[in-house]
Image (tube, rainbow, N blue to C red):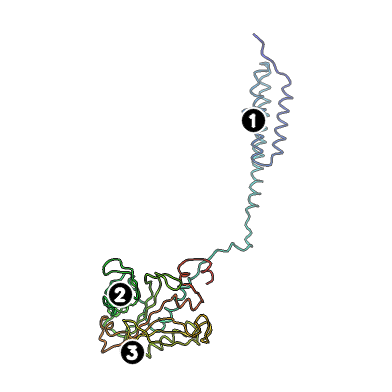
Amino acid sequence: MDEPTVRTGWREELERARREALAAIARATSTAELEEVRVAALGRKGAITAFLRSLSQYPPEERPQIGRVANAVRDEVEAALDAAAERIGQEEEARRLLEETVDVTLPGTPVATGHAHPLNTVIREIEDIFLSMGFELAEGPEIETDAYNFEALNIPKGHPARDMQDSFYMNEGILLRTHTSPMQVRFMQSRAPDLPVRMITVGRVYRRDDDATHSPMFTQVEGLLVDRGVHLGHLKWTLEEFARRVYGEGARIRLRPSYFPFTEPSMEVDVSCTICGGGGCRTCKGTGWLEILGAGMVHPRVIRNGGYDPDEVSGFAFGMGPERIAMLKYGIDDLRLFFQNDLRFLEQF
């Protein structure tokens, strides 16, 4: 049997491993580099670990002394690694804090804020005007009965006026309301026999129509005043005051005869052109006027359906589209822009 090889020069070998490890620790500038030094010195295949495993190759009488010196070197390297880890950890934390430092004197990142939709702005303005005149804000159902949407407004079955409003029927006698006028009867019924009756309502209405100036869903504002002695002059003053508040003190209105089944007499109401001031331009087609709403004196049958005696009281009603008011106010030429939620359009307001 061959004799085991006996190693010599262990002090030089151990001292070289010690110096190399301590020098590498001193050079390390990051946790990753320090881990590489630890593995190279004390890992499973590290220089100091390999030396400790080779003690069996030395004479038995020398092994205790060699083991004590090797363990002392390992402890020294481990202590150096711990000290370096603390130092490098503090340096890395300091660098990280410096990089993450927030300069509180810098302006913050702007946050996009919302604002009122142009249509909602006009609706609130209309409401404020009529509320200041003593009108009461009311709400009604969007799903309406044929009885309220047509018959109570003097539009019986077979009446040609029904052809003017292509309706969305849900089933027999139930439809999406085609106008806010049913609220005239509903509100009068809720107030009868008290006087005066002053109501303004804003809501969505629905018709089978879709082009640049019509939408299958749009908004209407309905106004109603019923009392003793109400006449056309009261309606004219109310609409003149409304026009002045919306379009400015110089705004004028004119009344043109028209036809609505639920008012008699009925009229279309124009306002002096907001673009040319009434002088005539392309917007108003040279007339100096722009149509804004329909109005009239409440038909006696509608008053009676509302629970009042048309021989004792009278009233006026008007209906307008806020989209139309907003289009004239802001110079918008396509009704559909109000409903498309295009930020390029909305941000202009």
Is 115 left or right of 60, judged from the image as shown? left
Residue at label 2?
149
**Circle 3 SS class:** loop
First-in-chain label (1 vs 3) = 1
Q: Residue 203 in the image: x percent, y percent?
A: 38, 73
Is 213 left or right of 38, judged from the image as shown? left
Q: Is residue 78 above or below residue 138?
A: above
Report the amino acid beneath label 3. Val
Residue at label 1?
42
Residue contact between numbered discs 1 and 3, judged by CB atoms under 8 Å: no
Mark 1, residues whose alpha carbon is within 10 Å: few (<14), some, or many (≥20)?
Answer: some
Q: Relative to the observer, which residue lies in front, 136 or 311?
A: 311
**Circle 1 SS class:** helix
- Which is more foreground, mark 1 or mark 3? 3
Q: Quadrant of residue 146?
A: bottom left
Q: Residue 199 in the image: x percent, y percent?
A: 35, 80
Q: Is residue 105 above or below residue 118?
A: above
Q: Residue at x 53, y 84 (%)?
A: 276
Report the amino acid beneath label 1. Leu
Residue at label 3?
230
Q: Residue 258 in the image: x percent, y percent?
A: 37, 84
Is 156 left or right of 214, judged from the image as shown? left
Q: Relative to the observer, which residue lies in front, 202 or 327?
A: 327
